[in-house]
Amino acid sequence: MTDKSLDWISKAALGLLLFLIHCSASTAAIQPKIVGGEFSKPGEFPFMAALIYNTAAQIKLVDDGTTYKSGFLSRGKIEGYKANGIACNWTDSSSGCSSSVSKNICVFYMSLTLGAQTQLSSCTEAGGIAAIVLTPENFSGNDALSYLAQAEDLAPQIPVNHLNSGHSQGFVDTFGRFVAAGLPLVIESTPEPRDYAFCGGTYIGEDWVLTAAHCIKGKNKDSFVVNVGTDNLIKGKTNILGVKSFFTLKNYDPKTLSHDIGLIQLKHTPIGVKPLKIAPEEFLAQRIEDLGEATVIGFGLQKAGDFFSRSSVLKQANIQIIPQATCSATLFDAYNQDRFPLELKLDETMFCAGSGNGSGSCPGDSGGPILIKKDSEYLQAGLTSWGISCDDFPSVFTNAPSFVESIEKKTGLSLQASVLADSGGALLSDSANQSDSGSNSGGGSFGLVVFLLVFVRALFSRLRQTTGQTSPTTD
């Protein structure tokens, strides 16, 4: 393979990387999860929780009964609505909404001329209760992504659905006929959970779920629900519960992922679900010292790098705890540390497990538990936090026992840890309605970007090795 060929592949891979990063920043990120391992036995992990975006929608044209799949803007208002649909700019893309939309639904095509802010402001100022935004057939994918990213940044105060007109031609044709005839058309929209998990969690008692801070930081609490106590996301829907509020540690650092732990308070208590206890700190410390085995569980990708291999059935993998020094060297020294664009480092709130044996956790298993056994009982050792690959490198986990005191203070639960060491005395802060643009609103997209950056670097390295070239050396 020539240098010219390598250069072309490098550019192609970089282009793919930038596209995926753009998508993860603009839309709900699709996360890789348990790779390798096996499907769990039914009922073995009744405490497992799955965080699921509640941003899917079914739009129904009431007059003819047809339905269309859509989605809500995750930072807008997420609730059902039913009213007359009123066209705002059906024939003139340079015009906004008139007063006729008051107490009705604004329906309009995306306009690059007007922009998302002008169009949505026109709808709300005219009294519209919701908006349905159609993608014109002549729009490129980048145009649509850019428009929707602008709309998300506005965090609109009304529900906003988006439809690709090319995939929903029946909606466009029917609505167009009613508009031409001057007749009202009743439209109904109903929010629905999506069919995959973007993060995991652990049910710890009453109405509380433990998860990773980066899964919830910056989220709209109405944009996701929690499925508690199931090992099958399609069949097990008994305990799909709304989110009342959520909290992260005050000293959680999104740059280093230190103190990567958070709590979700549910609107209701799950039915018939047994909570998981956190391991005593000295028991976990001994297991780490012994380099013992642990079990990591989660929903999602079954093949590393394949973003379309998500699993609706819970998977598990047995992995070995490894020394922190070895983990640090493996993660950073293998790739030029000075080229890492992120301030990731291991600290006392973390531990490592997995040794590149073809199975393990990945970014997006984030928040789900890593378990150790005491006698025949599973105990929570930590939470999946971050990593740079799916199965070639160790994963990094938040040390759950270190935060027992903070968790008990906030929840009032007794987690039965025998040593209550609170890392730094950090207290949990209210994050129930965070939507600041500087936070990780992708729910794990931060870990995805780390994975992609290192994946591309590894690709270049392996290509050079196959052609007899030397890999770049560490400065």
Image (cartoon, rainbow, N blue to C red):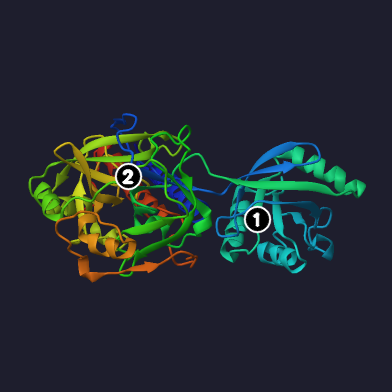
* Residue 233 drawn at (x, y percent): 45, 36
* Image quadrant in which the N terminus is located: top left
| Foreground pick, 443 / 90 | 443
Q: In this view, does 67 lie above or below 215?
A: above
Mark 2 or mark 1: name the one nearer the start of the chain. Answer: 1
Q: Is residue 97 above or below residue 5?
A: below
Residue 259 seen: no
The residue located at (56%, 49%) in the rendering is: 55
Residue 320 seen: yes
Give the labeled residue for mark 2: 362
* Residue 12 drawn at (x, y percent): 45, 45
Q: Is mark 2 on a helix, strand or loop?
A: loop
Q: In this view, does 237 lie to the left or right of 426?
A: right
Give the labeled residue for mark 1: 160
* Residue 49 drawn at (x, y percent): 38, 45
Find the residue positioned furthest to the right.
Answer: 181
Q: In this view, does 305 lie above or below 81?
A: above
* Image quadrant in which the C terminus is located: bottom left
* Residue 415 drawn at (x, y percent): 24, 54
> Gap between marks 2 and 1, in whole Å?
32 Å
Q: Is mark 1 on a helix, strand or loop?
A: strand
Q: Residue 210 has which mark?
A: none
- Residue type, numbered disc 2: Cys
Tell me the quarter of the picture where residue 402 sits.
Answer: bottom left
Q: Is residue 95 left or right of residue 77?
A: right
Tell me the quarter of the picture where residue 254 sits.
Answer: bottom left
| Foreground pick, 419 / 437 | 419
- Residue type, numbered disc 1: Val
Q: Are marks 2 and 1 in contact (CB under 8 Å)?
A: no
